[in-house]
């Protein structure tokens, strides 16, 4: 298997894992404050990342890599989780799909700015068209909006795109799982005290679904998903593989249908096919 194909497969696995992030966060913030949820998930994932680094005896990153790792921390360890947690107190999970649909475009733009990639002009056509497919579908499904929630989600998409692109760029030197692990470890001195300071007043008031949500976003969204995602972006290209995120909202709706018994509509299937076509077009013209 060639490197590019491997990148698309790894990226696809990462997107499937990330698909459960917003639903799990939505469940968790019903019983947990966003600051506690954000710091606790990073703390748990950081401790697991530290164990991985020690188990495989990974060398410490060079000092020159620290600014890039700091951007990864800002983008995907703190920024995106915190902003989405606050946003989901104002908008529904379905409404947030509008903004997740813009994440591939954000990632591609930062791939050009930070990664030096130069996709063909036709690539941008497919990228924008795919984003419009997702956003248009979401807007027709849910009118539960909030200006505060929308602005928080927009900020989350921008800062997450930066974190994705920067992490992928650094993965060429450190490796995919090493990047997210070191970023999480670097955040531990901040996350530990904030987690302890923001503990819920009564843990008895936190229901089982919230703990399950915390476990998912800590282990899968914050660590396991990135093991595949950063490797995929590094192998297949930030802008190209990043377009797989266009499928993430539909995977999330599919999980909702499978686990919660929600209905999968014909419109969802039609739009999904349109998005798949855009991803295929973006893949072809990415380089």
Image (spheres, rainbow, N blue to C red):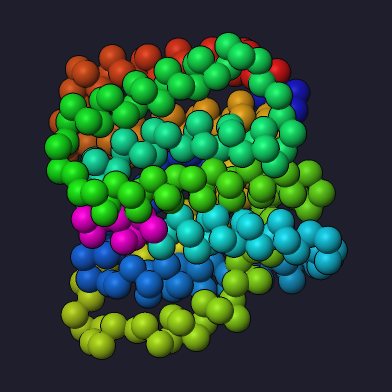
Q: Is residue 38 above or below residue 250?
A: below
Residue in view at x 33 percent, y 68 percent = 34
User: Would residue 102 appear left or right of 26 to someone viewing this image?
Assistant: right
Q: Quadrant of the C terminus?
A: top right
| Residue 140 rendering spot, x and y as whole percentages | 18, 27
Magenta segment main secondary structure: helix
Check residue 280 for magenta coloring.
no
Check residue 89 for magenta coloring.
yes
| Residue 63 rendering spot, x and y as whole percentages | 83, 66
Q: Is residue 169 above or below residue 32?
A: above
Q: Nearer the viewer, residue 13 or 80?
A: 80
Residue in view at x 28 percent, y 64 percent = 28
| Residue 110 rendering spot, x and y as whole percentages | 61, 39
**Which picture quadrant has residue 67?**
bottom right
Q: Is residue 72 above or below residue 248?
A: below
Q: Nearer the viewer, residue 6 or 41?
A: 41
Residue in view at x 18 percent, y 23 percent = 265
User: Would residue 41 appear left or right of 89 to someone viewing this image?
Assistant: right
User: Would residue 197 appear left or right of 140 to someone viewing this image?
Assistant: right
Residue in view at x 50 percent, y 63 percent = 78
Q: Quadrant of the N terminus?
A: top right
The span shown in magenta is 83-90
Q: Is residue 167 above or below residue 206?
A: above
**Which picture quadrant has residue 282?**
top right
| Residue 249 rendering spot, x and y as whole percentages | 35, 35
């Amino acid at each position: 298997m060639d490197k590019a194909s491997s990148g698309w497969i790894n990226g696809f696995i990462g997107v499937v894992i990330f698909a459960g992030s917003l639903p799990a966060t939505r469940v968790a913030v019903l019983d947990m404050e966003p600051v506690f949820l954000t710091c606790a998930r990073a703390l748990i994932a950081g401790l697991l990342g530290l164990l991985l680094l020690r188990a495989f005896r990974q060398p410490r990153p060079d000092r020159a890599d620290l600014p890039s790792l700091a951007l990864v921390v800002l983008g995907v360890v703190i920024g995106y989780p915190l902003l989405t947690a606050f946003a989901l107190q104002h908008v529904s999970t379905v409404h947030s799909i509008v903004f997740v649909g813009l994440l591939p475009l954000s990632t591609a733009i930062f791939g050009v700015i930070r990664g030096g990639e130069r996709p063909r002009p036709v690539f941008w056509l497919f990228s924008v068209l795919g984003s419009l497919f997702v956003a248009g579908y979401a807007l027709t499904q849910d009118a539960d909006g909030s200006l505060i929630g929308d602005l928080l989600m927009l900020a989350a998409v921008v800062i997450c795109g930066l974190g994705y692109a920067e992490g992928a760029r650094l993965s060429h030197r450190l490796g995919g799982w090493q990047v997210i692990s070191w970023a999480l470890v670097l955040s531990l001195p901040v996350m530990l005290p904030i987690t302890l300071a923001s503990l819920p007043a009564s843990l008895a008031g936190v229901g089982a679904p919230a703990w399950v949500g915390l476990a998912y976003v800590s282990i899968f969204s914050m660590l396991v998903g990135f093991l595949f995602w950063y490797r995929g972006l590094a192998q297949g290209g930030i802008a190209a593989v990043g377009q797989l995120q266009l499928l993430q909202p539909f995977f999330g709706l599919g999980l909702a249908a499978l686990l919660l018994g929600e209905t999968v509509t014909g419109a969802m299937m039609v739009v999904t096919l349109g998005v798949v076509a855009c991803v295929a077009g973006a893949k072809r013209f990415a380089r």
